Each structure stands twice: as C-alpha cells, then as structure tokens.
Amino acid sequence: MTETPLVGAYLEACRILSIPQILTEQYPKGLGPTVPELGAEGLKPHTKTSFSMLTESVESSLKSLGDPQQVILCGIEAQASIACTTYDLLERGMEVHIVADAVSSRSQTDRLFALSRLKQSGVFLTTTEVVLLQLVQDAKHPNFKEIQKLLAHPSPDTGLLAFYSSL
C-alpha cells in the first residue's frame, strides 16, 4: 500500500482551522484501527463494513454539521472507500474534493485508475498544499503562520507525477 503521510498534515490543518472532521474505519476488528502516525487522535471513528463511509452514524454527523454541501476526502483505499463514498456524495448533489496526495491504494495502478475515473465523474482533484492554501486564502489569515509550518517541508513523492498526463 502506498503511504499517505500528508493525511496527518491535512488533519492538523483542520484542527487549526476548526474544520469538522469525520473519521471512518473499515472493519477495525479484522483490519486493525487507524494507525497513530496519521494524527487522528481525538477523533471518534465510525466503524463500517460497507465501502462507502456514508453509514447511518456518519449521516447523523453530517446532519449535525448542517448538511454541508462541500466535502474534502483523504484516506485509503482510492478504488474502494474513497470511490464509493464519492459516488454517494455526488448522487446527493455534493461538491467533492479529493486530496490526491493524501489518498492511497494497495497498488499504484488501482490508485491511478480510481483517481482518473473519479475525475471523469466530476470531482475536483487537489493536493494537500493547494487545499490548505485555499482554506486560508490570504497570508493575513490569523492561522496562516501555523498552516505555513505544515507546508515548510517539501511534499514526499507520492508517485502521481509520472501518471499525471493520464489523469
């Protein structure tokens, strides 16, 4: 499985900016819990067996957040949970942004084809740095310096550049 080290930066930015986060875990009893390296401590995971994250408990969380119309997704597996969730969100008329360098799959082939198909379906593919800068909009934002620290180190090679022309 390709690594998603940028998920941690994205989650930290959400905490800094007070952006609500929803964490799901695919069958943790068999696959294990969310790894601590992602920095998801403090988030209560919604366990699931379906590939889509839109479970009853997640739907309830979305309602309590005022039924947002835009969603930013990151995580694993691009061809399963990310894809199924995205199609469910699009079906509800929501705008979906996928942080491509914070999404992985067990294979680069599955990741590439999933991202390509998702883009064809109308989602917005973005990167961690792009989405974080769009969230603050201006260097005068009160939290810009904290976000800038998250972007201080160059992003690791996520293996997507070689495939970019295919996306």
Image (cartoon, rainbow, N blue to C red):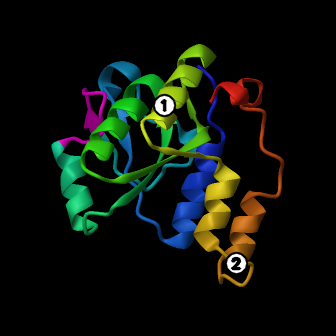
Which of 100 and 116 lies nearest the eye of the viewer?
116
Q: Is residue 54 magenta?
A: yes
Residue 114 image offset from top left, x and y in percent: 49, 25
Residue 128 image offset from top left, x and y in percent: 65, 50
Rate crowding at label 2 as few (under 14), some (14 to 19) or many (20 or more) other CA atoms within 10 Å.
few
Q: What stretch is highlighted in magenta?
A: 47-55
Residue 48 visible within the image: yes
Q: SS for tag 1?
A: strand
Residue 137 against residue 35 in the figure, above or below: below
Residue type at mark 2: give it: Asp
Rate crowding at label 1 as few (under 14), some (14 to 19) or many (20 or more) other CA atoms within 10 Å.
many
Task: Quadrant for residue 64, please give it.
Answer: bottom left
Which residue is painted at 83% across and 47% down in the image? 154
**Could you tell me what secondary structure mostly forms the magenta stretch?**
loop
The label shown at residue 138 is 2
The answer to whether 157 appears left or right of 143 in the picture is right
Alpha-carbon span between mark 1 and mark 2: 30 Å
Q: Quadrant of the C terminus?
A: top right
Residue 94 against residue 106 in the figure, above or below: below
Which residue is painted at 58% across and 67% down in the image? 135
Q: SS for tag 2?
A: loop
Which of 83 and 93 lies nearest the eye of the viewer?
93
User: Which callout, 1 or 2, points at the residue further toward the start of the chain?
Assistant: 1
Task: Quadrant for residue 109, please give it.
Answer: top right
Residue 163 image offset from top left, x and y in percent: 71, 24
The answer to whether 17 appears left or right of 46 in the picture is right
Residue type at mark 1: give it: Ile
Residue 51 against residue 58 in the figure, above or below: above
What residue did someone put label 1 on? Answer: 76
Q: Depth-wise, is mark 1 or mark 2 nearer the camera?
A: 2
Residue 77 visible within the image: no
Q: In which quarter of the image is the N terminus?
A: top right
